[in-house]
Amino acid sequence: MNPPRHGVFLDLGSIDRGDMDLSRLRQTCPRWDLHPATRPEQVAGRIAGADLVVTNKVVLGRDLIRGASSLRLICVAATGTNNVDLESARELGIEVRNVTGYGTPSVVQHVFALMLAHFTRLPDWLASVRAGDWSRSEHFCLLDHPIEEIAGRTMGIVGLGELGRGVASVATAMGMRVLVAQRPDGEPRPDRLPLAELLPLVDVLTLHCPL
C-alpha cells in the first residue's frame, strides 16, 4: 500500500488537550485535517477524499465507509474497534488498525481505584465527612460504613491479554485469588474455567475483551 496522502483525525480532542507532540503524526501524511470533535452529521463530509481516517470514539458505519471512495486505512486510537463496521471495511479492502498494549498502567490503576472505592466505601465516607458526621462523633472515628478487605477475595478475569495480565499481577500482589475465563471458542485449558462456572465463584469480575 502506498503511503497515505490525506489524513483526517475526527476527534483529536478526545485524547489531546494541547499537551501532545503531534510532529510524528504530521510527518505521516502531506496533508492532515485535525478536528477536535466531529458530530455524526459532519463525518461524511470530513472523510470524503481522505485515504486515512483516525477515530477514537466517532462511529464509522457501513454507509459512511462505503461513501468514502478514497479510504484505504482506518486507525482507531484505542484498543476497541466496535465503532467501526469491520465487515464493510473488509469487503472494500480497507485496512483497520487499533492500538494494543497502551495505557496498561492507567487501566490497571482504574480497575483497582473502582474496587477499592467499593470495598472501602469511599463515596459513603466522603459524604459522611462532608456532612459533619466525623466532627460530631463521640469518638475519634466513625463506624457507619463497614470496610471490607479485598485480600482473600476472588477476582474473575475475562480476557487475559495485556490489560488482563496487568490486573491479575496486582490482584495477586494484594492477596486475591485470580480465576480466568475460558475463551468461548478456544481450546479448553486446565488453568481456565468456562464463564458459567467462573461467575458463581468470584467476588469481582473484570472484563478486558472486545465489546
Image (tube, grey):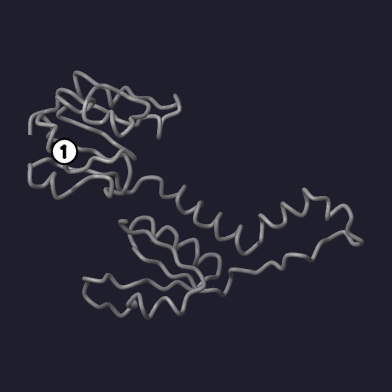
Residue 42's place in the image compared with 198, above or below, is above
Label 1 sits on a secondary structure element that is helix
Is 108 on the left-hand or right-hand side of 76? right
The quadrant holding residue 84 is top left
Image x and y of residue 178, in percent: 45, 71
Horizontal and vertical percent for residue 64?
A: 18, 37
> In screen coordinates, is 29 left or right of 57?
left
In the displayed orientation, state which residue is furthest to the top. Answer: 30
Residue density around tag 1, few if under 14, some if 14–19, many if 20 or more, within 10 Å:
many
Which quadrant holds the C terminus?
Answer: bottom left
Residue 60 location in percent, x, y?
Answer: 23, 40
Please state if 202 lies on the left or on the right of 29 as rendered: right
Question: Going by the picture, which residue comes out furthest to the right?
Answer: 138
**Which residue appears at 35% of the width and 55% of the height?**
162
In this figure, what is the number of numbered marks? 1
Give the x, y percent position of residue 87: 14, 50
What residue is at 21 percent from the left and 19 percent from the top?
Answer: 31
Q: Nearer the viewer, residue 196 or 110?
A: 196
In this view of the protein, which residue sits in the foreground, 127 or 116?
A: 127
Q: Quadrant of residue 71?
A: top left
Picture residue at 41% right of the left edge, 73% below the top: 179
Which quadrant of the figure has residue 47? top left
Residue at the far front in the pictured view: 41
Residue at the spot x=41%, y=50% of the render?
104
In the picture of the structure, the residue carrying the numbered disc 1 is 65
Position above or below: 37 against 56: above
